[in-house]
Image: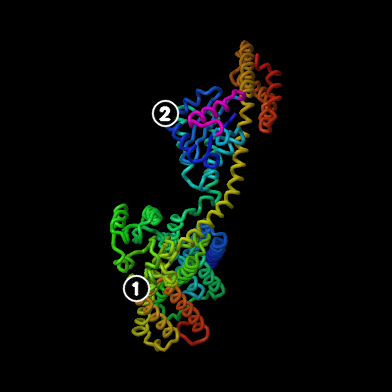
Amino acid sequence: MIVLVGLNHKTAPLAVRERLFAGCQDLADLPADLLSQGGVREAMYLSTCNRVELLASVEEDSGAETALTDYLARRGALRREEAESCLFLYRDEEAIRHLFRVTSSLDSLVMGEAQILGQVKDAYRQALAKNATGVALNRLLHRAFRTAKRVRTETGIAANPVSVSFAAVELAKKIFGTLAGKKLLVIGAGEMAELTCTHLVGNGAEEITVANRSAAQGTALAEKFHGRAVSLAALDEALGDADIVISSTGAPSYIVTEAMASRCLRKRKNRLLFFIDIAVPRDIDPAVDALENVFLYNIDDLQGIVDENIKNRRREALRAEAIVTEEVANYLNWLRELEAVPTIVSLRSKADGIVRRELEKAGYWLTGLPEDDREKVEALVHGIVNKILHAPMAVMKEESAEFASQDIVAAVRQLFRLDD
Amino acid sequence: MTDLEFLLFVPACVCVGAATGGYLLSLIVKKVQVARVSTWILTAGFVFLTLGLILAAFSAQGWGGFGSRHLLSVYAWAVSGLYLALQFKTRTRVLGAFIAPVILVFLIVAAGQGSEKNLIPPAWQGWLTVAHLVLAIAGEALFVLASAAGAMFILQNRLIKHKKTGSMIRFLPSLSDLDRINHIGLLGGFVLLTLGMVGGSVYAAFVWEGTWASDPKVIWTFSVWAVYGILLHQRLAIGWRGVRMAILSGTVFLLFAVSALVIRFCLPTIHSFI
């Protein structure tokens, strides 16, 4: 049986998640520790800032689920009521579905984010390195990765940015094509401007200039990006050189007026210019947007893009859920077939043993035959046995896929005396 | 047109038609993959067209013996060749949605033309006439490319300006790429058209010695050439670019195309073979 125990950002507050995260981080050999719990055959644990979850293949009716739940509660020093309200326990289909949803980023705080897949892969690698996984979890994790890949390629869940700074980067790319070599001017040294600047630089933008009222703050930000700091008095000149302007000062009136933008356009021979105004109140005169080859996006415009993209992701999530359902069904089929496999193997080996022994008994007259004829007789015997066994083996496989193999498997074991 | 030429012309038309449909579909479904497949189909059409023209050149013993259908096919060939060459440098597959219909129109008009040879009077045939024609056609093909990029620039510029940041904005190429193609098209087209006009003038002045200067096509082409020259000057010296350049270059090209048709069919001109 597959079980999944854990907590995440939906079930537990940050303080509880922190405690459990720290409790699990301390343990160097956590997979081995998990395997030492009664009834646990295979196990791995996933720990990120938003979730701590244990995935295990356990023996039926062994009490392993309770053992794993208690184990997590101990590691996080959770009080009884905390454990009851924060920890969830999923079995079989629910557990598999949850894992597939987590890996496909359908359960993430920011739906569609790419980081979680890498985190699950890392967790799996760690368990693999400690020999804590076996046939059930190996197959399950590979199915989970496959599901995540299908969700990313077949739906648009990760297609559009869902943060203001990423939305600004995407827009800049639609204006300039590539950001390589593009010059950035940052007006004000706020956190949001810094974050947007980081994303733009990460995408190739170069030559950062920071214009700030406070020279010390401006220099500090400029140094972070190996750029230069200028005073607000030199803004006119700095505007002429920049391709992308990010503004986030706390100024009560416009820092960049239409006249300033017009002057700088003449200086730069009308090369495209992108203003990102994330200040409230606004720093850049809205009239600037009417100028040719100038594009102005304020915080509401960018937030509008983000909201629209979030709506799109939600729509795409419905398609992703359908993929998850399909993949869960595929995995369950495989798991159920597994129930009949030991009996099929036993039946096959018993039949092969009988054939071998009977051929040995018939050895005295078989050796008198020419080699060709002897081979034909052996092939005939094998063929007859295969034909007889084909139907019961096929029925066992089919029934196991329909959840109904237990009685048939028991009957086959009794009829062929496989347990003797 | 020989049977073999016809066998190559038909699949070329089918491929360009299919590519046009594919490109337009890509605009509707907003999938670059569809535009990418259409580019391969257009490439196949270009190969058929190339083989057909090579065959025609052999059977007509040179370009001088080409008929109207051939010359219009050369236009289609030049536009598609330049567009496909551009695809090696930029990732602007979607631009095909504006280029492929133009190529298809050239081929449809070509299909309706006579395929008889020697429309260029035999007395005028020679390497200078061929150079004049090839350079002028290549120049005009580059203007087609510039206009298509300009039209797409206007569309993308409008979407970004009006904050309509849906899937269309992501699907269309960046403004910078489109502006660059518009500029390269205008610059290259202007240079080639200039050389083509010089070739024609030299031929007319020294070989033919006819009254070419009063020909309406010559006068009109010279006017258009001058306007393109002014546009280029404004871009390089003053910095006219972006949406203004896209609108102006597109308007000039439309006027050029419409007047070329009017001159060809309504006015007496020595260029009646095209």
Judged by its main secondary structure, the magenta piece is helix
Which element type, helix, strand or loop, lies under badge 1? helix
- The answer to whether residue B59 of the structure is visible from this angle is no
- Amino acid marked by disc 1: Arg
- The answer to whether residue A221 of the structure is visible from this angle is yes
State the residue in front, B225 or B116. Answer: B225
- Mark 1 closeness class: few <14, some 14–19, many ≥20 residues within 10 Å: some
* Earlier sequence position, callout 2 versus callout 1: 2
**Residue in the image at 46% along x and 77% along y:** B253
Host chain of mark 2: A
User: Over which residues does the magenta segment extend?
Assistant: A60-81
Mark 2–mark 1 CB contact (< 8 Å): no
Host chain of mark 1: A
**Residue A345 lies within the magenta run:** no
- Amino acid marked by disc 2: Ala
Give the x, y percent position of residue A326. 61, 42
Residue A263 numbered tag? 1
Query: Real-space Cα distance between discs 2 and 1?
Result: 63 Å
- Mark 2 closeness class: few <14, some 14–19, many ≥20 residues within 10 Å: few
Give the x, y percent position of residue B256. 46, 79
Q: In which quarter of the image is residue B242?
A: bottom left
State the residue in front, B218 or B2. Answer: B218
Which element type, helix, strand or loop, lies under badge 2? loop
Q: In this view, does B256 lie above or below B170?
A: below
Give the x, y percent position of residue A336. 63, 31
State the residue in front, B260 or A298. Answer: A298
Q: In which quarter of the image is residue B54?
A: bottom left
Residue A28 numbered tag? 2
**Residue A74 lies within the magenta run:** yes
User: On the picture, is A395 further left or further right than B46?
Assistant: right
Q: In this view, does A192 lie above or below B188?
A: above
Give the x, y percent position of residue B30. 54, 59
